[in-house]
Amino acid sequence: MTGLTVAERIIVHLGRFVGHCDEYSAPVDVSQNGISQAVRISRAHAAIELKKLKETGLVTEGLAHIKGSRQRRKIYNLTPSGMTRAGQIRDFAESEGIDVSALLDLARCDPLTFWETLEEDERSAFGMACLLRGPFDPSAVGEDFARLMPIDEQGMAVVPQNMREAVPALMDDSLLRESHSRAADHCLSIKDYAGRLHHLSRAGRTREAAMLIDSRGDSILQRIDGPLYEALSMLNRIPERYRPQVWSFQARAALRMEDHGRCRDLIDLISSVDPCSALMIEGDLLAAEGDLESALTCIEEAHELSPPSVGLRCRMADMLCELGRHEESLRLLEGMLRSSADDGSCERTDQVLFHIGKSLLRGGRPDDAVKALSKGMNMAPEEERRGWHLLMGEAYQAAGLQDRATEHFRMAR
């Protein structure tokens, strides 16, 4: 397949680091782990091949501090005979039209050629790695398979973009679903709920996806993007008990992605099972389209249909605020705070304070907005704080405190 044996690839790899190692410091690339990753073989296989190369006098073994580590580890260097052999291998590769650097750089490998070299269990692991969106802990695929991909300076596995784009199309439907399913379970282990929803949807695990939307929908919605939005369209045969929640989530996702046609279609579905939610989402849609008066009418109608709700009244306050009726908005929100203090209930006090902060900011009172937001942010769940940081950044910016604003915008990212 490659035209070079594993031993020859190790020699060529080590030939790139001649003169870069001493007993005090050496790059990770000349350790057993670095060699196995570069040549994409297991550490056990690398140990066997290195032993053979030592016996033939092409490689020497020593101890050195690996850069970035306090421990001394075994490192490997070419002997003079090994350096001569490395030159011969490169000459042979050039004469045969073999791109040696591509063999040692996954980003330069042809995805189809590389995929065809993998065993079935390797395809399962590498396929999952190509589906994970961003660097990940190598333990997600297991030490034996982490060698298939580069590891960055933070110890995270990184799959090159060319592989991410090409490999999923090379996987059959069964393997693709299996890999998405494994990715979903990994996302659960690191509490990446948006990623888990994406992979559950792609894996056909609809019931679990619906349950996740029901329990984590609000925080996931803040991280909606193109791939996740596309994956949501694959949810079918939704269990009846979760349909209102899933349809509402999909409608709000469509609204955030500015897919207003899809949002309207979903509002029609929702109205048959949950008229109040349908009116609320329609109000948000009308507001996004600039018809604030009609939006407020929808929210008021929803309020008449439902029991008192913090979320609904906060939405009404938002509409009033957008219409420039800041004092009305504040009176509504502050009345909610007083009521909760009188009856001893603290239902989503953080949410009320968030909207008070927004009303104060839009009404030209950034200093007061900062006070309200500072008080409420400490009560808000960690996974819901992105919106808080964005609004806090706006408030500090309006108050002329750019350093504090920049800090909150950074935390929002």
Image (cartoon, helix red, strand yellow):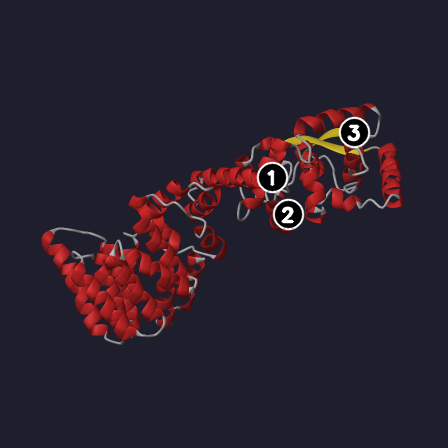
Residue at image x 72%, y 49%? 108
- Residue type highlighted by circle 2: Met
Residue at image x 55%, y 38%? 174
Cα separation, mark 3 vs mark 2, equals 34 Å
| Lateral position of residue 174 relative to residue 313, left or right | right
Q: Give the secondary structure at mark 1.
A: helix
Identify the residue under disc 1.
126
Q: Label 3: how many residues lie within 10 Å, few (<14), some (14-19) or many (20+)?
A: some
Mark with earlier residue (2, 1): 1
- Residue type highlighted by circle 1: Phe
- Residue 373 spot, x, y in % from top left: 29, 61
Callout 3 touching callout 2 (CB < 8 Å): no
Mark with earlier residue (3, 1): 3
Mark with earlier residue (3, 2): 3
| Lateral position of residue 408 relative to residue 36, left or right | left
Identify the residue under disc 2.
163
Identify the residue under disc 3.
60
Quadrant hosting residue 357: bottom left
- Residue type highlighted by circle 3: Thr
Question: For the residues carrying marks 3 and 1, which lies nearer the camera in this image?
Answer: 1
- Residue 375 spot, x, y in % from top left: 26, 57
Q: Give the secondary structure at mark 3.
A: strand
Q: Can I make out residue 71 in this image?
A: no
Cα separation, mark 3 vs mark 1, equals 32 Å
Question: For the residues carrying marks 3 and 2, which lies nearer the camera in this image?
Answer: 2
- Residue 273 spot, x, y in % from top left: 26, 53
Quadrant hosting residue 363: bottom left
